[in-house]
Image (tube, rainbow, N blue to C red):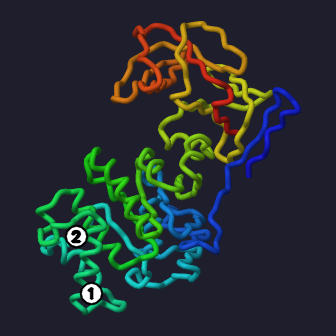
Amino acid sequence: MLLPEDHSNAGAVSFEGASDRKSSAAGAVLELDGVVRRYGGTTALDRVSLTLAGNEYVSLLGPSGSGKTVLLRVIAGFEEPDAGAILFKGRSIAGVPAHKRGIGFVFQNFALFPHLSVYDNIAFGLTNRADRPITDKAKVRKTVRDMVELVGLAGLENRGVHQISGGQRQRVALARTLVAEPNLVLLDEPLGALDANLRNRMRGELRRIREKLAVTFLHVTGSESEALAIGDRVVVLDNGHVGQFDRPDEIYNRPANPNVARFLNCYNIFSGTVADGGFASAAGIFPVTRLRKTSTGPAYAIRRDLVAIRPAGQERGPGQAGVESVFLASEYSGSAITYFFELAGGQVVEVENHLSHRKPEELSPKAPYSLIWSVDDAVVFA
């Protein structure tokens, strides 16, 4: 719960906790309560609790080894948890085999049958499923045809899956899963094998298809930009824990702890201590107006695109913080330029300049500059 700032005492530091926005259990399609998964002495999932509503797109973000794929496998039934409960549509699915859970799974490598056509790959789940397989060929044809139209594969039904592109194979894998009408679809980095341009286009396609069918997607990705762009809400996994679960804008602007800020790859983070209304770091003492309570230790984070480059030694204005630095290099990425600066203690600070907002900076290598930002833009963890 967010605590309101106290404006009655200028200069006072206010505290705010991580937001706790959850879907109500009444409308939940999936509920995880204290789920644990261990492999020997390693805990891959540590008391994971989540509630996913019906008809929403949830991104699952985290670095390699954070437990993302393990969580999907436990939900799908490929592995059983060591502790905790999993409810699907209000009922426990403990011990229920994967093929009887009614949960769809789209694998990263698509897992298509190479000897079958596009049509037969999609139809396979209808005619061979354990629960009420469809034997009426006319009904199978209509169901597959409707799904082919939905995912944009019309005209490719008779081609082998080796004769279509990576993006089209991804659509076949999705269609094969969706044709069984699951209430929940788990996607394990489904766009990871695609090139950058196709990956961006498929984001919109996945959202369109999901909205059309009104099912819930849980989409694993290691890309922070993909997670923020595609999810109605985003889960950030941190070493088997849920670091944050909230709307993309909330996570981007108000990360719950320093690890979440690091995963987003858009913050400069300073270590140090909080004392006397300020944050003391190796780079100096920064004024603080708000603190975010966290159990992971103190840190000071400022987003790269909120830092301004000024002449060396420029005096800080009211409500501003900053550091002195030396310019190292820049990196052009098309829509933005990232500038790299080194502080006296050796820490590198990045400044992102979106070219639609500002002209490129004319900077001299090895020259000194002041880096300045608004105190209110910082996220300070205590």
Q: Position of residue 176 (x, y in %)?
A: 29, 73
Q: Mark 1 = which residue?
A: 139
Three-letter amino acid code at disc 2? Leu
Q: Say whether residue 342 is left or right of residue 134.
A: right
Q: Is residue 204 left or right of residue 376?
A: left
Determine the residue positioned at 76% across, 41% down.
15
How many angstroms separate mark 2 from mark 1 (CA)? 22 Å
The residue lying toward the viewer, choosing from 257 and 226, is 226
Tag 1: amino acid: Lys
Q: Is residue 167 above or below residue 362?
A: below
Q: Please state the horizontal and vertical placement of residue 277, each as a whole percent of the image.
A: 78, 28
Label 1 crowd (10 A; few <14 / some 14-19 / many >=20): few
> Callout 2: few (<14), some (14-19), or many (20+) C-alpha neighbours within 10 Å?
some
How far from the left and from the top, in percent, is residue 179? Answer: 33, 76
Where disc 1 sits, the SS reads: helix
Which of marks 1 and 2 precedes in the sequence?
2
Q: Which residue is mark 2?
A: 112
Return the residue nearer the eye: 259 or 377. 377
Closest to the observer, 71 or 378: 378
Q: Please say if 18 is above or below 340.
A: below
Q: Residue at x 12, y 68 (%)?
A: 159
- Quadrant showing the C terminus: top right
